[in-house]
């Protein structure tokens, strides 16, 4: 009888122990999963600052793995240990994008979707990521101004319809290590993406997978020597961007260095420009015009005796050949050797595959789908393979 009672007690104890062990292991595994698996629904977090490592909340890894070009070392707000969740689409106040930026370094995400009608520009400080993935965010009236800042990432937002005094959709001035990725920029009074005045004699920028449209003077990189001599130290990588029927400045370069590869340039007036000793290397880009009277894909001379020519290297043969699309009379002018950059990069062979991949996927990840509607405007690529082939450099 005593032995039986002991066995019953031991059995009861073992049952409780096993239940406890299972619950412990289950809770432990859940907490581990929470620490490693990103939260896709940002409404699970409170609006404003959340003091938590960004990789415990959002998928930072897939974004950081795509860093490339001159700004490959950027990390944005990752090291801040703060995630700011935007929950308010007003211009200012608690939970707004303006409040997030005024709070300083953080990884900014959006718990809401919609349009933010700005009453003045947004100033972007150092060590910040503006991450629109998982939401549909439009900024209108004014854009982003990145001035005297370092280490900034802007990805997956739309900036459009600037008012008369708004100047640029994104202005980068006297800043360094900036990455602009998967944005859609359109219809501003000055530029869509302008990069000027080198930061402490060094500015490194990458612009990738962006869509530029409904605009004339698209991208200015560097000022002339008599205005900003330090701009010879601006270095920019442009890859897999879609210039969707914009007017000119794809880009307009002065003094600095630009490496362009796998972009689609569909211009109205003029393609890429390099002046005042600028150095422009163009590899495996698609070149086309909307106006058969404007056939210049490249230009390096100004009708100004005080401003010297720039330099352009744009091969038309080999694995890094640029491709003329739709009008064989397009003119590609070269005038000098431009060194390849020191960083590692991978060029996609200019085929139908990469052409449609860029035109369909460049821009804000929601807005890119609308580019299907302009499919008829895109010149076809004859006699080109459909498979994508990548070459390492």
Image (tube, grey):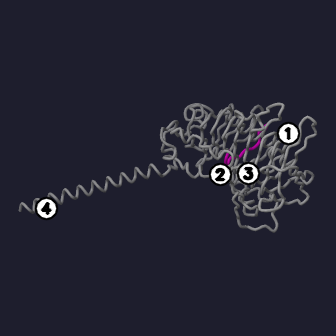
Q: Is residue 367 above or below residue 191?
A: below
Residue that protrudes farthest toward the left in the picture:
1
Magenta region? 180-190
Residue receiving disc 4? 7
Q: Which residue is mark 3?
A: 241
Residue at position x 72%, y 47% from top? 237
Q: CA distance from mark 4 to mark 1?
A: 93 Å
- Residue 365's mark? 2
Foreground mark, 4 or 1?
A: 1
Q: Quadrant of residue 147?
A: top right
Left or right of 69? Residue 89 is left
Relative image position of residue 108 (x, y in whole percent): 57, 40
> Residue 323: x, y in percent?
82, 59
Q: What is the crowding at mark 1: few (fewer than 14 residues within 10 Å), some, or many (at least 20)?
A: many
**Mark 4 residue element:** helix
Mark sitting earlier along the chain (4/2)? 4
Does the image show residue 141? no
Which mark, by number, is residue 276?
1
Instruction: Give the distance between the C-alpha atoms of the residues marked 4 and 2, in whole angstroms.
Output: 64 Å
Q: Is residue 327 left or right of residue 219?
A: right
Q: Quadrant of the C terminus?
A: bottom right
Q: Tell me: 216 left or right of 59.
A: right
User: CA–CA distance between discs 1 and 3?
Assistant: 24 Å
Q: Closer to the N terminus: mark 4 or mark 1?
A: 4
- Pick whichever of labels 2 and 3 is earlier in the sequence: 3
């Amino acid at each position: 009888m005593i032995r039986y009672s002991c066995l019953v007690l031991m059995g009861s104890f073992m049952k409780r122990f096993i239940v406890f062990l299972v619950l412990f292991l289950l809770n432990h595994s859940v907490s581990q999963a929470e620490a490693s698996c990103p939260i896709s629904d940002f409404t699970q977090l409170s609006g404003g600052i959340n003091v938590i490592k960004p990789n415990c909340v959002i998928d930072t890894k897939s974004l950081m793995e795509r860093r490339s070009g001159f700004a490959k070392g950027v990390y944005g707000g990752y090291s801040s240990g703060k995630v700011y969740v935007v929950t308010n689409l007003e211009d200012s106040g608690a939970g707004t994008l303006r409040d997030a930026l005024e709070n300083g370094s953080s990884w900014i995400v959006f718990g809401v979707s919609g349009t933010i009608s700005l009453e003045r520009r947004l100033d972007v400080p150092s060590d910040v990521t503006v991450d629109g993935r998982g939401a549909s965010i439009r900024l209108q009236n004014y854009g982003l101004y990145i001035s005297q800042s370092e280490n900034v990432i802007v990805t997956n937002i739309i900036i459009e319809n600037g008012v008369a005094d708004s100047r640029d959709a994104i202005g980068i001035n006297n800043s360094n290590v900036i990455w602009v990725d998967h944005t859609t920029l359109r219809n501003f009074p000055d530029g869509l993406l302008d990069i000027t005045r080198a930061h402490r004699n060094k500015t490194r920028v990458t612009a990738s997978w962006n869509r530029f449209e409904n605009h004339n003077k698209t991208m200015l990189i560097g000022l002339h020597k008599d205005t900003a001599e330090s701009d010879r130290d601006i270095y920019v990588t442009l890859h897999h961007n879609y210039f969707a029927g914009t007017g000119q400045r794809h880009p307009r370069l002065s003094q600095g260095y630009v490496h362009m590869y796998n972009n689609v340039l569909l211009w109205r007036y003029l393609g890429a420009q390099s002046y005042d000793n600028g150095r422009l290397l163009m590899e495996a880009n698609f070149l086309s015009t909307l106006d058969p009277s404007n056939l210049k894909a490249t230009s390096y001379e100004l009708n100004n005796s005080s401003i010297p020519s720039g330099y352009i290297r744009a091969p038309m043969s080999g694995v890094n050949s640029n491709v003329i699309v739709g009008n064989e009379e397009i003119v590609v002018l070269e005038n000098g050797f431009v060194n390849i950059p020191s960083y590692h990069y991978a060029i996609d062979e200019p085929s139908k595959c990469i052409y449609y991949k860029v035109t369909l996927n460049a821009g804000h990840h929601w807005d890119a789908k609308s580019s299907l509607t302009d499919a008829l405007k895109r010149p076809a690529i004859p006699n080109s393979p459909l498979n994508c082939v990548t070459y390492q450099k």
